[in-house]
Amino acid sequence: MQLARVIGTVVATVKTPGLQGVKLLVIQPLDRHQQPVGSQLVAADAVHMAGPGELVYFVAAREAALAMPDPFVPVDHAIVGIVDAVAPLAGDEIAGDESAGGEP
Amino acid sequence: MKLARVVGTVISTINAPDLDSRSLLLCDLLDPSGRPAGGYLIAVDSVGAGAGETVLLLDEGNSARQVLAAPGAPIRTVIVGIVDEVTGPPGPATSLPARAAGAEAADGQGPGSVRTSRGPGPGSRRGGRASPSGSARGSRREPA
């Protein structure tokens, strides 16, 4: 799974039967500093609540179809969660000690 | 499988039902010498990995679902192990992660082995790991 930003929607009236009722969003994959990386994708929205501007995470490949109500649909990227926060785990300064215990 | 370092946690309340109450960790991919290989993955934790630990990532869906006993879950990447040490042929390419380098120098290890423990020596490694893992687990309960 990777982070992405929803940047748009896709409207398609003529779709393969399995995609009826599936919401499609344009996403921009992000690196872990939430900077755009790679090319934009069309992903199915498996949580039914993502919208433009939101930070989400998505799953690719066969697992994307498993996120849909019908697991046999032609979907190769699916949004499976909306991110509330990405909390760093103290990064490099936790070296060699148990300071992670103080993390909120 | 891939080597990675846990660098963060992803907190999410709205997610696919199969991801409910699963902890998601942000993992930087590493090469065998412990340096960032570029890229990252968000993985489901199955072993209680904690901050800064080097872990073993399984990035294949069927195996991931089997490990988690979650058939049909849209999950592909799972943390399946916590790495204590990686050894390989010595050479100039072998470099240590910043924090391990200190321990390495203190231990007087050769360049061929990469130590990923966070304790000062082998004796404290296990104990050192248990504590942050437990607390990290506790801290990740909050989003649920």
Image (spheres, coloured by chain):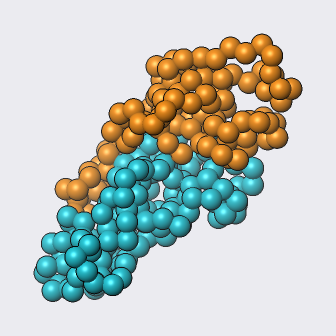
Q: x and y percent of residue A9 in the render?
A: 60, 17
Question: Residue A96: x, y in percent?
Answer: 22, 68
Q: Which chain is orange?
A: A
Q: Could you say which quadrant of the image residue B14 lies in?
A: top right
Identify whether A17 is placed above or below B33.
Answer: above
Work out whether residue B47 can be spotted. Answer: no
* Identity of the residue furthest to the right in this view: A17
Q: Say which chain is cyan.
A: B
Residue pictured at 64% horizontal, 17% vertical: A10
Q: Residue B4's spot in the image, x, y percent?
A: 41, 61
Apparent side of residue A54 relative to residue A9 in the rendered image (left or right): left
Q: Is residue B15 left or right of residue B48?
A: right
* Residue situated in front as seen by the camera: B17 or A26: A26
The residue that appears at 74% across and 24% down in the rendered structure is: A22
Q: In front here: A72 or B10?
A: A72
Up/down of B83 relative to A58, above or below? below
Residue at (83, 30) in percent of width and height: A18
Q: Is residue A12 above or below residue B40?
A: above
Residue A42 horizontal/vertical position (percent): 61, 28
| Residue A94 in sight from this viewpoint | yes
Residue sitting at x 70%, y 47%:
A62
Q: Nearer the viewer, residue B26 or B90?
A: B90
